[in-house]
Amino acid sequence: MSTIKYKSILELNHLEAREFFLKAESYCNVDFPKYINFSRLISKVHRVLDGKDLSTMRKNTPRAYDDVNYTILNNKDGRYEWRPFQLIHPALYVSLVHKMTEEVAWESIRDRFREFSENEKIKCLSLPMKSLSKQTDKAEQILYWWKEVEQHSIELSLDYAYMFETDLTDCYNSIYTHSIVWALHTKKIAKNKRKDGSLIGNVIDSHIQDMRHGQTNGIPQGSVLMDFIAEMVLGFADIELSKEINSENIRDYHILRYRDDYRVFVNNPQDGEKITKFLTEIMIDLGLKLNQSKTKSSDDVILSSVKLDKFSWAKKKQIDKNLQKHLFIIYDHALKFKNSGSLSTALNYFHIRLLRTKKIPQPLALISIIIDIAYKNPRTYPICVAILSLLMNFISSNETKKEIISKIKNKFSKIPNTGHMEIWIQRMTLPIDKTISYSEPICNLIKGEDTVKLWNCDWISSTELQTAMQEKYIVDKKEIRNLEPIISKEEVEHFVSNQLYNDEY
């Protein structure tokens, strides 16, 4: 009998939920080097706000400012498409966690989620999880995805002949904040109690607007808390979808939902078409829309259950005795399946191989190939830089290393929004030369510059809270002092696993 290694967020009481959301990895799930740690900062802000209301510490509304959160525009395609990751203003984040995890509020949220899941034929498989093992919360979530989405989809081929797939276009940036209130309290109550500050839905709505310059469209990406809030809206959509399906008397179906990714299993393709139509209409009503390019159906459930890039990689030759030929195999896969999870996995195996390699006669050629992969596949930044750190170790001259770093920086300067890459390049260069300059403010913070401001605090009146909000608290100086030139497998492996299963929002 297998031991349960996790708890769903809904199995936690209000105090446990508070502790969970106040963890550094819940506040920020963006992949950063290990010396960037938000634990101390969040803890300090929590101590100041514990038992107090943030409204008593304000001299102005935060929504009057457009730079309250810190945004990292992460390039998505190596060209002109990017995803905004936000480091939510810690005071607003902690305040929202406190409000949501008050006992009455938390119980009302849990009760509503029980209603979301009443239809056993519609399974939500993406609620945040607390790990009960030595694995991180993220690692347990990834394993759960593999078991309950991918593997369960394959198993459902015994029962269903067709699978319909779809997801939402730019989900997080499109969520209408007022729909959170609808989701938690119904549209009728939300309309009648629009200004009722006791409704937790209104509290969440107000906090998010405070984070986003008063905007009512979009929620920040990059935290487990916002993943959970997105589940409120998507859970509400599940209820509405269930009503529509029941009204048409459709009985032979099963739906798996992971965040905004839907897999609809049916034996009658007309039922699949109807369910997809219902989903389209429901999402329009919520200000969301299906991604037409990713909406498809198949009568091969097994093949459709596994991502195409993963299936393709499983079929092809994955390794060669010659290092450069091995890397060319990966490069070819990268051209066909950009930013894919299987690409990150392939690079991880190459990284492990390099860790065992004692001699590389021409490292510069391999460096050039890796840089080109990273350039066109931004989701591979951490593992590519880890490989670069190994290859650079085979270059004896520090001056040559600095020249290569300069060329890498120059290459990436040609595309916009590469601050995330700069953060990882800095991880590689810190043991070589701590003085190398970068344009990304977080890099300057790591260098020890004390003028860097990530979050606008002009709206805060409390000196105590201002003091707790110092950016320097996110830098672990001990980790920096102990950095090795070679980036270890442990530093990047959970980022690689995350890329394997995490679809884009």
Image (cartoon, helix red, strand yellow):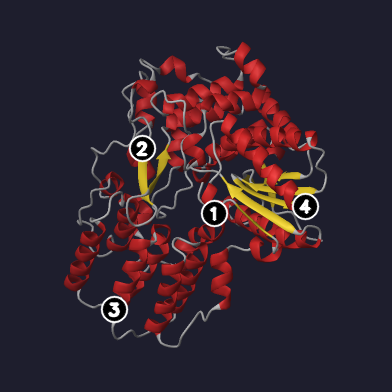
State how far apart marks 2 and 4 are (Cα). 48 Å
State how far apart marks 1 and 2 are (Cα). 23 Å
Q: Which residue is mark 3?
A: 365
User: Do the CB atoms of the residues marked 2 and 4 lie less than 8 Å apart?
Assistant: no
In the rendered view, does 497 fall on the left or right side of 154? left
| Residue 149 against residue 278 in the figure, above or below | below
* Camera-nearest residue between 408 and 482: 408
Give the class, few, some or many, for how many residues have Cα within 10 Å of label 1's Cα (few <14, many ≥20).
some
State how far apart marks 2 and 3 are (Cα). 37 Å
Q: Position of residue 392 (x, y in %)?
A: 29, 73
* Camera-nearest residue between 220 and 310: 310
Q: Position of residue 498 (x, y in %)?
A: 53, 57
Q: Position of residue 342 (x, y in %)?
A: 52, 66
Q: Which residue is mark 1?
A: 502
Assign a secondary structure to mark 2: strand
Q: Comparing marks 2 and 3, which lies closer to the viewer?
A: 3
Q: Which residue is mark 2?
A: 70
